Image (cartoon, rainbow, N blue to C red):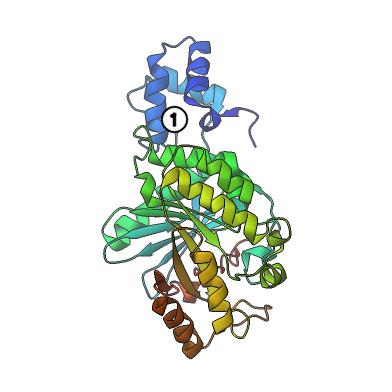
């Protein structure tokens, strides 16, 4: 790795200071910020309204190291999984999910994951490091290309549901959201962004205070502490009651309903009693519930719930007036579905 500073790690104010140090006028920093975050420049040479002399000076003092494509896989259902190479040669994965009226990017926030949820393939990987804000941003730029190519429309939605726990990379995730939603960046609407967490109560509360209007989803998967403790270690330190309090606070600050993500496992969390426990949580905060079909992971004892159990579970909730939907898995044939990102094709 180069000893030169990565120019994309500077804030707008810091970038201005750096440009002035190089003996350039202040307005050059604004031009550069636009090239970096609005035009998604991947090299100094692309910054064609800057003089060649200045571009050479930039290359002498800074690096610009974008994330690059590594492996592309396309599912029978149109889903695209993109393996991406980081500047330090580590690999991450992201997914573009096409629908008739939308194109969704599922992006990663860490290389690997430290939470070891027992049902998730990513949880078997060690967490190597957090992603920089620019590396998260680059995933969106690269996946947008495939949305345009394969779905005929740009990305409409971004979900932080890939590899890693977003709220354990708080600062970089927040910075990336600002870059993606800023008029000086990609200018996507905040309401089109969803951050999915396994339940970091303090992080949810901090996000509520940021003054932004993106969405929050909780990977719940069990509605009692007793059951959740057995499949998600994070519940040992972030009990459901604490997480629910944080979600209520998030709603009070943003006015956005939260989403409960609930994978149904056969004979584990799919009984009428489990549905009743989930109903009680739903009644505490304005919410949606996404029931997710499990994608079996090699070496994991938990299995997908039977279709009759799923239907009974969902009908119970609907009959109680719950806003619930079943989310069908996409990209299963290329290991791109929920919980399957594990760099199988990587090093």
Q: Residue at x 29, y 62 (%)?
A: 151
Q: Quick one: quadrant of the N terminus? A: top right
Q: Residue at x 68, y 73 (%)?
A: 227
Q: Residue at x 71, y 58 (%)?
A: 126
Residue 316 percent location from the top left of the image: 45, 81
What is the quadrant of residue 239 in the picture? bottom right
Q: Residue at x 49, y 72 (%)?
A: 334
Residue 54 percent location from the top left of the image: 43, 18
Q: Does residue 12 sit above or below 305 in this rendering?
A: above
Query: Which residue is denoted by mark 1 in the rendering?
Result: 44
Asked whether the viewer can see residue 132, the reply is no
What is the quadrant of residue 299 in the picture? bottom right
Residue 278 as seen in the image, left or right of residue 159? right
Residue 183 as seen in the image, left or right of residue 222? left
Q: Quick one: quadrant of the C terminus? A: bottom right
Q: Does residue 116 sit above or below 131 in this rendering?
A: below
Check disc 1 and report its element: helix, strand or loop.
helix
């Amino acid at each position: 790795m180069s000893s030169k500073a990565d120019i994309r790690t500077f804030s707008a104010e810091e970038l201005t200071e750096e440009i002035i140090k190089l003996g350039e006028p202040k307005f050059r920093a604004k031009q550069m910020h636009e090239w970096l975050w609005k035009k998604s420049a991947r090299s100094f040479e692309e910054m064609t309204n800057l003089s060649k002399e200045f571009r050479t000076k930039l290359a002498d003092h800074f690096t610009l190291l974008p994330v690059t494509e590594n492996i592309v896989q396309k599912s029978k259902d149109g889903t695209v999984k993109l393996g991406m190479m980081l500047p330090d040669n580590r690999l991450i994965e992201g997914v573009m999910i096409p629908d008739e009226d939308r194109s969704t990017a599922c992006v990663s926030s860490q290389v690997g994951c430290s939470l070891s949820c027992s049902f998730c393939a990513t949880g078997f990987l060690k967490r190597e490091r957090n992603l920089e804000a620019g590396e998260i941003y680059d995933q969106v730029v690269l996946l947008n290309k495939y949305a345009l190519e394969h779905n005929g429309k740009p990305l409409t939605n971004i979900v932080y549901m890939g590899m890693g726990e977003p709220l354990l990379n708080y600062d970089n995730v927040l910075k990336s959201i600002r870059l993606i939603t800023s008029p000086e960046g990609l200018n996507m609407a905040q309401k089109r962004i969803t951050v999915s967490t396994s339940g970091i109560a303090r992080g949810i509360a901090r996000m509520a205070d940021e003054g932004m209007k993106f969405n929050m989803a909780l990977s719940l998967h069990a509605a009692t502490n007793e059951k959740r403790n057995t499949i998600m270690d994070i519940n040992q330190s972030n009990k459901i009651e604490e997480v629910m309090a944080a979600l209520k606070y998030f709603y009070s600050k943003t006015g956005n309903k939260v989403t409960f993500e609930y994978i149904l496992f056969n004979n584990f969390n799919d009984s009428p009693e489990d549905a009743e426990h989930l109903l009680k949580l739903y009644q505490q905060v304005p919410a949606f519930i996404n029931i997710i079909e499990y994608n079996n992971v090699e070496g994991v004892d938990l299995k997908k719930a039977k279709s009759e159990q799923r239907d009974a579970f969902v009908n119970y909730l609907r009959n109680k007036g719950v806003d619930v939907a079943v989310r069908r898995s996409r990209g299963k044939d290329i290991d791109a579905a929920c919980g399957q990102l594990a760099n199988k094709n990587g090093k």
